[in-house]
Image (cartoon, rainbow, N blue to C red):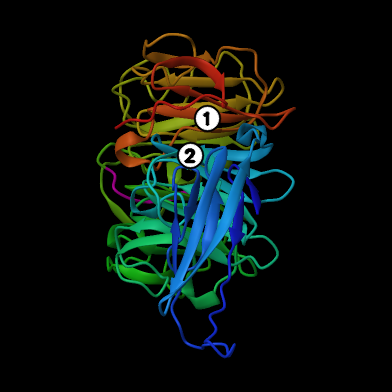
Amino acid sequence: MRLTIGGTKVLAATASDSAGRTLSGVVVDWRSSDTNVVWVDAERGIVIGRAIGGATITATTAGLRANAEIVVDKKNPFDIVFSSISTVGNYACGLEAVTNLAYCWGDNHSGALGIGGAELLELPMLVGYGMKRFRNLSLSAYWNCAIEVGTDLPFCWGYSYDLPPTGSQPGEVDVPSLVGAGRFRFSSISAGTVVTCGIEVETSRAYCWGEAALIGDGARMQRATPTQVGGAGSDLRFATISASPAVVCGIESVTAHAYCWGRNDSGQLGDGSRTDRFVPTLVANGAIRFSAISAGESVVCGIEAQSARALCWGKNSLGQLGDGSVTSRLLPTPVADAGLRFSSIEAGPNMVCAIEAETEAAYCWGRNVYGSLGDGTRLDRLVPTLVAGGIRFASISTGGAGGAYGGYETCGVEAKTGRAFCWGFDRLVPTLFEATPSWPK
């Protein structure tokens, strides 16, 4: 049997007695002679090619044993054409453009890569053994979610810091698991480490689950199942939603007004105060209409609908608001953009990146100690600064919900080719994703 690097197969074994009668109810144990070349799930017989070479897979049950030889062929796993890529720092995931298959690579702590067992993997590996096709992939710190193409059903995997709506207890979910027993169909989903939120397809209502302060229903109770934002009687309908470890924000579908809720110690709710809010609260009292919004842990940014200018608010100790100062802001404040107009924006814990609408060039600002701004330096930037390399980007990810590692690395998808570029961890400019990443230990 032949595999390619990153390819998967499901093996099956049938046990028979000396008379040739099939034995039922037996448990098969699967082992690989070299897990560095071919990894196998001990219970399910799913094999994954990890490196060029060969390995013997052994199936054992009821004192019987059988072998299968697996050869892993050469294939460049970095030839994947992505439609999107997301990173939280020490691991990353992307969606293949043509197939909608999800790939992850990096630190597999607590099942974050969605591939079952195995640890640090520096090659893209198929999420869920390639059995499902996804859209709207969202990463947080070891807890990730996506929506299945065709069904709109939400699936999550990794480590749930609160009660997960997957029928399991808090802890590891190492392959994609259905949310809410299939009762919910979402148009979009956002994982925020301790809270996850989605927008229902038919009603455009937002639902969240996880951390009590971030559910948005005012009850301040931890929820294990998706709970309507604003409470059961709320008429709020959302076009988009963004969750982080401390704050959730969304854009109302009819008015384009932004609402935020959660922690507000840095003014990241944008209501002019530092008071925590447990229900959706109008940003800037509804004075601004937004086309996009992104919630970081202590900073939130959005794009004004009419002008396409970027606005940020919250913490600003490292210039992450991009207004040329280090003064925190309690209300949306225009970045010092010199006339730039943006199509998308993503806020990280201490940095922000955005894609300019006309040129598709990327600009970043804020913390830069690891080179995650991509301008060839380690200098913090107080205003939007052009990412080096002249690359035109279709999407960009700063690891906004990544907790401890968020903002250490930035990744983006090149608009024309779908190739992935990443920078940070002392790669000071965008680097084509074909080299071993130097993940943090």
What residue sits right under mark 2 in the picture? 92
Measured from the top left, where is residue 395 in percent x and y?
Answer: 61, 34
Secondary element under disc 2, as helix, strand or loop, is: strand
Of residue 414 and residue 19, the one placed in the foreground of this image is: 19
Confirm whether the magenta stretch covers residue 179: no
What residue sits right under mark 1 in the picture? 411
Q: In the rendered structure, which segment of residues is drawn in magenta?
A: 259-264
The answer to whether residue 107 is visible is yes
| Identity, as a three-letter code, of the amino acid under mark 2 | Ala
Confirm whether the magenta stretch covers residue 260: yes
Quarter containing the C terminus: top left
Compared to residue 138, the image places residue 215 above or below, namely: below
Residue plotted at (28% across, 36% down): 266
Of residue 297 and residue 90, the one placed in the foreground of this image is: 90
Residue plotted at (44% across, 51% down): 33
Of residue 137 and residue 4, the one placed in the foreground of this image is: 4
Disc number lying in front (2 or 1): 2
Q: Residue furthest front?
A: 18
Compared to residue 297, the image places residue 64 above or below, namely: below
Of residue 39 and residue 394, the one placed in the foreground of this image is: 39
Crowd class of label 2 (few under 14; some 14 to 19; many from 20; radius 10 Å): many
| Identity, as a three-letter code, of the amino acid under mark 1 | Cys
Residue 23 appears left or right of 305: left
Measured from the top left, where is residue 79 in percent x and y?
Answer: 67, 33
The reply to whether dot 2 and dot 1 touch (C-beta < 8 Å) is yes
